[in-house]
Image (cartoon, rainbow, N blue to C red):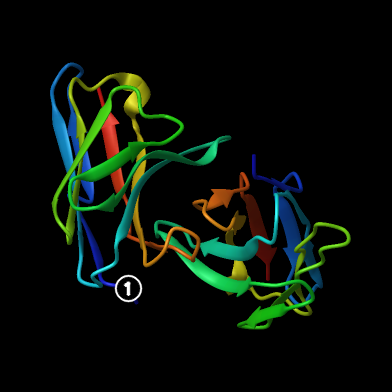
């Protein structure tokens, strides 16, 4: 299995609070991604990174920011959590932009 | 842009039944095609892939053939087991583009 660790695995937070999710990889892959999974929507890309300090938006980036200060770590921040951001969040990595991605175990976030 | 269309679900089968899950795609050029599986409470795992036309990907008894003429990559298994109950995602990448996923389909296999 690809070495991808997401933390925390579960979190409950209150509306309006900031939340940071962490993704750590041991594969030295260049590309890292954050997705959210919701019933009826499948997987939707939030942000991705193509190198240290190089990031770009996905299809549902509003309300989210990311940072990548080291190859192995990719952080997703909800600046002010809302109930619509209750979801399961997955981190993924890939060597190249157009190859298969490997996924972490997911973080279940509940905003109350 | 690229897109993936999967058949509507959920699908419920009896153990040892034959499985087909349809997937069609729209893409420019020559995409690579993938099937991912997600077991309950877990992340997505790559099940199989095909990178050029007429390639057949296979793993764990599942197969899918890259059909460029019909822009399809249907997933098949001859005899499903209860342990195959999961969500299945079809996906593609283009020459310089990220993974694009279908919406996924839930498979339930009854004993």
The residue lying toward the viewer, choosing from B85 and B75, is B75
Q: Is residue A7 left or right of residue A38?
A: left
Q: Residues within 10 Å of mark 1 (few under 14, many from 20)?
A: some
The picture quadrant where one finds residue A55 is top left
- Give how far across and how far down residue B11 sits, in percent: 73, 54
Q: Chain of mark 1?
A: A
Q: Is residue A89 above or below residue B17?
A: above
Placement of the N terminus of chain A among the 4 image quadrants: bottom left
Q: Residue at x 79, y 59 (%)?
A: B72
Placement of the C terminus of chain A among the 4 image quadrants: top left
Q: Is residue B22 above or below residue B52?
A: above
The residue lying toward the viewer, choosing from A34 and A83, is A34
Q: Is residue B98 above or below residue B79?
A: above
Q: Residue at x 58, y 35 (%)?
A: A40
- Give how far across and how far down residue A43 sits, in percent: 49, 43
- Give how far across and how far down residue A10 sits, in percent: 23, 45
Q: Is residue A11 left or right of residue B11?
A: left
- Give how far across and how far down residue A7 sits, in percent: 18, 52
For this orientation, the residue located farthest to the right is B69
Q: Residue at x 80, y 73 (%)?
A: B17
Q: Residue at x 27, y 37 (%)?
A: A109
Q: Secondary structure at mark 1?
A: loop
The picture quadrant where one finds residue A37 is top left
The residue carrying mark 1 is A2
């Amino acid at each position: 299995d690809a070495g991808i660790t997401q933390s925390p695995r579960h979190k409950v937070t209150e509306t309006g609070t900031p939340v940071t999710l962490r993704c750590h990889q041991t594969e030295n892959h260049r590309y890292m991604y954050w997705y959210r999974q919701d019933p009826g929507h499948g997987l939707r890309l939030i942000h991705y990174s193509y190198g240290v300090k190089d990031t770009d938006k996905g299809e549902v980036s509003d309300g989210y920011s990311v940072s990548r200060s080291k190859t192995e770590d990719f952080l997703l921040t909800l600046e002010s959590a809302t109930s619509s951001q209750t979801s399961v969040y997955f981190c993924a990595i890939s060597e190249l932009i157009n190859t298969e991605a490997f996924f972490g175990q997911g973080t279940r976030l509940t905003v109350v | 842009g690229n897109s993936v269309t999967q058949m509507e679900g959920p699908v419920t089968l009896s153990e040892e039944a034959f499985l087909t899950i349809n997937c069609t795609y729209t893409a420019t050029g020559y995409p690579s095609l993938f099937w991912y599986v997600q077991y309950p409470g877990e992340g997505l795992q790559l099940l199989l892939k095909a990178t050029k036309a007429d390639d057949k990907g296979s793993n764990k008894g599942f197969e899918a053939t890259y059909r460029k003429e019909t822009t399809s990559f249907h997933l098949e298994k001859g005899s499903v087991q209860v342990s195959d109950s999961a969500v299945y995602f079809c996906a593609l990448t283009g020459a310089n583009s990220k993974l694009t996923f279908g919406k996924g389909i839930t498979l339930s296999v009854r004993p």
